[in-house]
Structure formats: C-alpha cells, structure tokens
Image (spheres, rainbow, N blue to C red):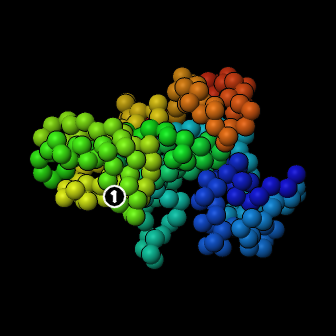
Amino acid sequence: MAVRINKYLSEAGVCSRREADRMLEQGRICIDGIPALPGQKVEDGQTVTVDGKTVRKEDEEIFLAFYKPRGIVCTTAESENGEKIVNVVDYINYPKRVYPVGRLDQNSEGLLLLTNQGEIMEKILRSRYGHEKEYFVRVNRRITPEFLRKMSQGVEILDTVTKPCKVWQEDEKSFHIILTQGLNRQIRRMCEALGYEVKDLLRVRVMNITLDGLKDGQYRKLTDQELNELYDQLKDSSALPGGKYKEQWAATQDNRTRQGKGKKR
C-alpha cells in the first residue's frame, strides 16, 4: 500500500512528519535513488534513503530519557552553517537509530526524549494536544509579582501571544514554568520581552517523564510504568489510530523487560 513519504519516515522512526518535510526541501531524501518530492508516495518494494542511508522500519521500540548538557545540538546533522557541531545522536552513540523528540536550545540543558517511533514523536510534539513540559529558569535580576503575572497570562512574541501557562517562583531570581506549546526559544523570548535575561534554563519534565535519577550527559530507557502512563496520555490522539500503539506495547512488553533497563553514560 502506497504511503506518503513523510508518513513513511515517521512510521519508520526516522523523524517527525514536519521534520521530514524540511528534509525533503533540502533534497536529503531519495526514493529508488531519485530525490523525493513533497507529497510523493512510497510504493511497496521501493527503497528510501536519507542522506544516502537506507531506511528500514525498526522492530524494537526504543524510548530514552537523556539529560542533555549545554552545548549539545538537538539535531542529527553533523554540521551547521559550515561548522562541525556535536549533535545529540552522535553524543549518545546509541547502538540503534534514535531521534530526538523536539528540540532543546544549544545553551539549555535538561530532559530530552529520544525514540525510533515516529508517530509517538509526532503526537508529543504537536502543541494542539496540550502536553506539558516543565522548566526551571534562572534570570539576571529579581523577579516581581508583575513579571510572574505577565508570564502566566501570555507574552507577545513572534507575532503572537503565548498561551496562558503555570508559573511559580522558586527564589529571588528563579522560577518554574509549565508550557503546553513549543515556540522557538519561547521562554528566552518571553523573558526578553519583559526585560529579563535567562541565565540558566533546565527542562525537568516532559509529560509524565522526569529528569529524576539522571546526571548531566546520562541516558536511560523509560521504564514499563513510564511507558504505560505515557500511552495512557496519548491514547486519545489521532496519531495513535484505534489504540493500536498501546496494543503493540502490550505485545512487546515482555521483550522489553528481557532487554533490561538500558545503559547510562
């Protein structure tokens, strides 16, 4: 059965559909050796390559929680603007192909999820589903009640107003914030719009997955309990048709248990 190239790559765990569209525009994707076009379909028996590497669907489901250090770039590219970079995939050097779920600024640190399951990646990333991401932020000067009020009600950035969010103060110059959208450099831009500069930004949670137990640069596999809770939160999504994914998880639960809890760096 023919399937659109961006969906094919998403289901193969290569990237989200949105990222696939960007890669198509960059000419990085080929079907049977010919550069693919946006919207083009992949027929049974055709060979798909990304950056010259053949794409094959993975049988093993991989979900990792990673404490991204500062300086690591959340991409699979080896260079940016002509300069060599340290990307997250090379840094982790996991034995099987995984891709980051979304991005975390190069100068930010904290929790980053990686997986080879593109449809799950797509579901977590889409802001319309309202999935929470929690951050700890330290700024350059004293926080005021007015600052907290404006941050929580919405700040005008990037020709839009950010969605209302939960914000609470930690100490004189730091606070926690829970976002349900993912605009580019959102927290930094929100603070800048209110006259503050972010000094430290740490992501501590994505949905039900937290940074607990991980040190800077370490990763681990998600536990069965974490995966079960994650699927419960995702099960109403159109990205998971008919609850199929949760059934797949149940069928492979024993296999994951046999493979262990994963390694830490």
Left or right: 220 as drawn, with respect to 30: left
Left or right: 250 as drawn, with respect to 216: right
Instruction: Tell me the quarter of the picture where residue 52 sits.
Output: bottom right
Give percent across and percent down for residue 63: 56, 38
Q: Is residue 261 visible?
A: no
Give percent across and percent down for residue 102: 50, 51
The local crowd at label 1, few if under 14, some if 14 to 19, many if 20 or more residues have their Cα within 10 Å, is some
Please say if 24 is above or below 5.
below
Residue flagged by tag 1: what amino acid is it?
Glu
Quarter holding the C terminus?
Answer: top left
Give percent across and percent down for residue 264: 44, 37
Q: What is the total number of numbered labels drawn onto the structure image?
A: 1
The residue carrying mark 1 is: 156
Question: Which residue is at 78% across, 74% downward?
Answer: 34
Question: Which residue is at 71% across, 48% downward?
Answer: 11
- Disc 1, SS: strand
Nearer to us in this view, 42 or 190? 190
Q: Can residue 181 be seen in this view?
A: yes
Question: Which residue is at 56% across, 30% downward?
Answer: 233
Please say if 11 is above or below 209.
below
Left or right: 190 as drawn, with respect to 246: left
